Amino acid sequence: MNSTSDDTMLLTTPFHSRVSRACELNAWGSWKGYTTPKAYTDVELEYFAIRSTTGVFDLTPMNKYRITGPDAGPFLNRLVTRNVDKLGIGRVGYTVWCDDAGQVMDDGTIFHLGENDYRLCAYARATDWLFWSALGFDVNIEDETAAVAALAVQGPTSCAALTAMGLEGLADLKPFGLAEYDFEGETLMVSRTGFTGDLGYELWITPRLAETLWDRLFEAGAPYLIKPFGSDALEIARIEAGFLQAGVDFVPAEEAVRNGRTRSPFELGLDWLVDLDKPLFNGRQALLREREQGSRYRFVLLDVDGNKPAHNSFIMKGRRKVGTVTSAAWCPTAKSNVAFAQVELPHGAVGEELVAEIYYQRELHWTRVLAPCRVIEAPVFNPPRRRATPALPF
């Protein structure tokens, strides 16, 4: 068992020479110790690259763990809530994992790369938890975060741009599928995955070829108006698509300081990821009790009146606070003011009318708005091109 990603902080990714050259705003943030751009030139233009052409995001800081050995599958089945036995080779599955109290530690994706060979991608560093959970299993866990460079290539012309780069047959790759290509004598793995809710792919390559991959991609994608985008544009896109963000929409159980601040998969609307027919996994007994006794909270999507995002707002029912907003954005493509909120049960049924207490500042003046909002059933952005196979030509 090897670990590398915690050794050094203030890291740069293998794409940094290209990223820093493109980052005209010099707007930088930190993602798990890596220096990453919040925006390159203009957040709105970067967002519309995702929705109208092709946007590219440096995904390298995502924590990546290679899990191999005779017990790799049983170990993952013990770790996560979904049934890994149903995930075929060459497929990717979204999942969550819980502590013994049934509280979500993180969400992520499992890549089934081959027999007894998996990659787990996670927002939070999970090294210690993985090692503890591996006791009794014949399994090897390697932190390969620094050993794999990754790009997210997202948007309606993403397939066309990648095909122009030489990735023939990519249009036939199904959502959550994997394909491999030769790239300068090394394997370029491509997954039809992403965090934007649009047609898109993620590219996985050895770090020594990262700059070459970036250059080839942007050369081939130029006719398709390819553009890099930062975390600010990604935030709008993922809210529009209804995707949760660990550390924002829920507190990972291992990081929580105060009791009652964590959430179960049921309380995050992720019950579809919980397979209680599996005989044993972390948190199963607690989740069985919760299913019988009921949950404390409900995760809801809200359509908020007006155009002021309800960041960090209270959610009111009459004069009583019944919830809090975790994420909010004005979503340009959907033309909707969207908020994610955790509300106390029994509130939050689809169609229920609530009120968001919004505060915003303009020119040193704070304004309070009580904005009516309504619980909606599904994300406001879910285009057919996201799932179409073969990928539609644009």
Image (spheres, helix red, strand yellow):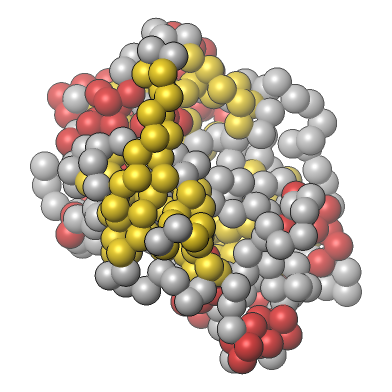
Of 364 and 48, nearer the camera is: 364
Q: Taking 273 as reference, is 289 left or right?
A: right
> Which quarter shows the C terminus?
top left
Residue at 35%, 45% (x, y): give it.
370
- Residue 336: % across, % down: 22, 46
Of 144 and 325, nearer the camera is: 325
Q: In this view, does 82 lie above or below 357?
A: below
Residue at 48%, 76% (x, y): give it.
346
Residue at 40%, 61% (x, y): give it.
318
| Residue 242, picture quadrant | bottom left
Q: In this view, does 345 lie above or below 317?
A: below
- Residue 372: % across, % down: 29, 52
Of 85 and 315, nearer the camera is: 315
Q: Taking 153 as reference, is 36 left or right?
A: right
Q: In this view, does 377 lie above or below 286?
A: above
Q: Taking 359 as reference, is 159 left or right?
A: left
Q: What residue occupies the far front of the structure in this picture?
A: 319
Count of labels shown?
Answer: 0
Residue at 61%, 46% (x, y): give it.
247
Q: Is residue 363 visible?
A: yes
- Residue 324: % across, % down: 51, 53
Q: In this view, does 209 lie above or below 142?
A: above
| Residue 300, picture quadrant | bottom left
- Residue 94: % across, % down: 50, 63
Q: Can residue 211 be seen in this view?
A: no
Q: What residue occupies the far left of the structure in this picture?
A: 394
